Amino acid sequence: AGDTHRADVPSPLGVRMAAPGTRSLAESFTLNTWTGTFSHTIQSPGYTATHQLYAHHSLVNLMAFSITIQRLDGSTHPITVQLQSLFVPQSQDLDLTPGPDFQGAHYIYGQTLVPEVEGGPRPTVHMLWTPVPQSLTLGGEERERCWEFLTAVAGSEEEAKRSYSAGLALVAAGSLHRSHIRAWAALRRSCSVELDGPFALCQALHGCLYYLLSAIPPRDSPGAPFHGISPGGLSNGTRGEDYWGHIFWDQDTWMFPNILLLHPEAARAILHYRIRTLEGARRNAQEQGYEGAKFPWESAATGREVCPEEIYGAQEIHVTGDVLMAFEQYYCTTQDQKLFREDGGWELVEAVARYWCSRMVWSEEEQLYHIRGVMPPDEYHSQVDNSAYTNAVARRSLNFAADMARDLLLPVPEEWEDRARKIKVPFDEERKYHPEYDGYSPGEPVKQADVVLLGFPLMHPMSAEVRRNDLEMYEPVTDPAGPAMTWSMFAVGWLELKELQRAQSQLEKCFSNITEPFKVWVENSDGSGAVNFLTGMGGFLQVVLFGFTGFRITRSGLLFDPAFPDDISKLKVSGVSYLGSKLEVTITREEIRMEVIETSRDPPAAPLEAVLESGQRFALWEGMAAVSARSCCLKSFGKKP
């Protein structure tokens, strides 16, 4: 397991268009986040050549690129562009065999050379692709021509052929790219975040949304299992790079809340990934001598620990609570009991609660439960006792497990509630702040956001004074070269306290991790670490979706308490999903406007109710809106606030 990495599939799409020998060329590269298309254009005095590349949004096994040459003058000489490619149908990770051509496509198939764990499955891959010539020529009599090239990749021969044939049919109808644009545009309309503010902030926001939405399954995708989101996304993670394609808490803590708010079907697919890997998590706990399920620090296909360095898998156990917090947020937002009753969710909740109970020890001296020998999110420290974050997330796990049992009319083990009440979360009564762990000395350097996560997303109970003290204690000692998601959580904290200038200064730090010109994030501000760092993007999006709006997902309702810096005048979020309704939320300096734009028909959603700060209550049916001057709460109609 120490060498487990994402298998490298060779890509026929790695083509670069060139026009050698032509003078006065102008080249441009464009990423259109509203059509999900990357374009390279060569402009010469007599013609335009355009290379478009996209992963088809509704045909999920299909990728395509096209080359279009358009004559701009009255000339009749042939126009040739070259296609440069390094593609060879081989892989260091796959045993690939050529098969017979299919409908003009070349075909290879095979399986991974090594299983993830001994005796485990060796996944298969089947790939069909249109052969790519070394050059393309527009004939002297032609004004314009488009060549289309398809690649289909699937786990079975049948699915690869079905996808390739469907692509060919759309090519014949002249609608391959158009059908992709329609599907992508429908997704973007239903997951739209627009703000009136600085151009750089708007671009960064669109980039984050694009890259994150690119990594999740489309709404109408077939029932193929989803294997989670790695910090570098879908296409990064070969041996030794981009965390080898593994899944971390990055998915559940940093990316998931945004996906849940805008695309609950994809959020559910992420939870199903964790449910499918539950048996591996049980094995992890058993091997360490504990009960229940311990989710791995690094997860792949089986749920077994695949981290190449033992210390993290053994000590960074907060990930188990992070996984369960995602389940809790999902349940509070959807009230989807089927996931828990029928689809394995309850078994996971119960297993995590049992793990935490077995991982705690009773301290006679303090008359509290301790969790000892852990690494907190701050990875500069290890083998510490009572990490504030780890213990707080364990408490939240146990409280959720007890609440969920009650909702499912199941008995609640007394042990769960007892340990949730009596677990130690370190607190310094004199300085009124949370030490990171037992024995932490103020001023000790910290790698990344840790204790500040108690305020958000954990919403651990504390006064505004303590929240401020935690932020002020850890902000100056957090490594400025640490990972990109850190500053977003400081920004959310300061927004919560309505300290807008301090929030702005933290948000601005995020921009040093954004590379030009396509707003791809890197993990560290010096350019090192994972590329296409979705974790940082997820944190940045949470500043907008949970910081500026003040959204808080609770058992009693969806809370709003907006605050944004002076250079932003308006924020509109379309497609917020809550209890079966879709909302459009518009926030200005004067008011919050919430409109129900769609309600679920299957099952029929109950109407929502807006509870304003004044105590006024409004039932919200489809097509209705409520306006509040300040903070408010949204909940199911008739439910006590």
Image: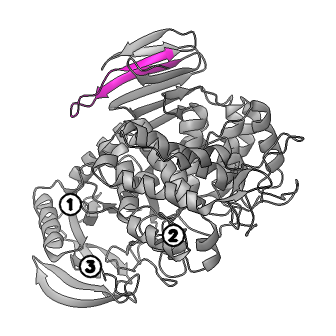
Q: Which-is-in-front pick, marks 2 and 3? A: 2
Left/right of residue 459 with respect to residue 134 in the rendered view: right
- Is disc 2 placed on a helix, strand or loop? helix
Residue 583 location, quadrant: top left
Check disc 2 and report the residue beneath it.
285
**Number of marks present in the image shown:** 3
Q: Amino acid at mark 1?
A: Arg
Magenta region, residue range: 592-611
Circle 3 residues within 10 Å: few <14, some 14–19, many ≥20: many
Q: From what the image shows, is residue 287 above or below residue 497?
A: below
Q: Is residue 593 magenta?
A: yes
- The three-letter code of the residue at mark 2 reads Ala
Give x and y (percent) for residue 325: 51, 48
Q: Amino acid at mark 3?
A: Val
Marking on residue 226 = none
**Label 1 vs label 3, nearer the camera:** 3
User: Residue 143 has which mark?
Assistant: 1
Answer with mark 1 or mark 3, whichever residue precedes in sequence: 3
Label 1 Cα neighbours within 10 Å, binned few <14 / some 14-19 / many ≥20: some
Which residue position is annotated with label 3? 125
Query: Which mark sits nearer the N-terminus, 2 or 1?
Result: 1
Distance from Cα at disc 2 to Cα at disc 1: 67 Å
Q: Is residue 304 above or below residue 448?
A: below
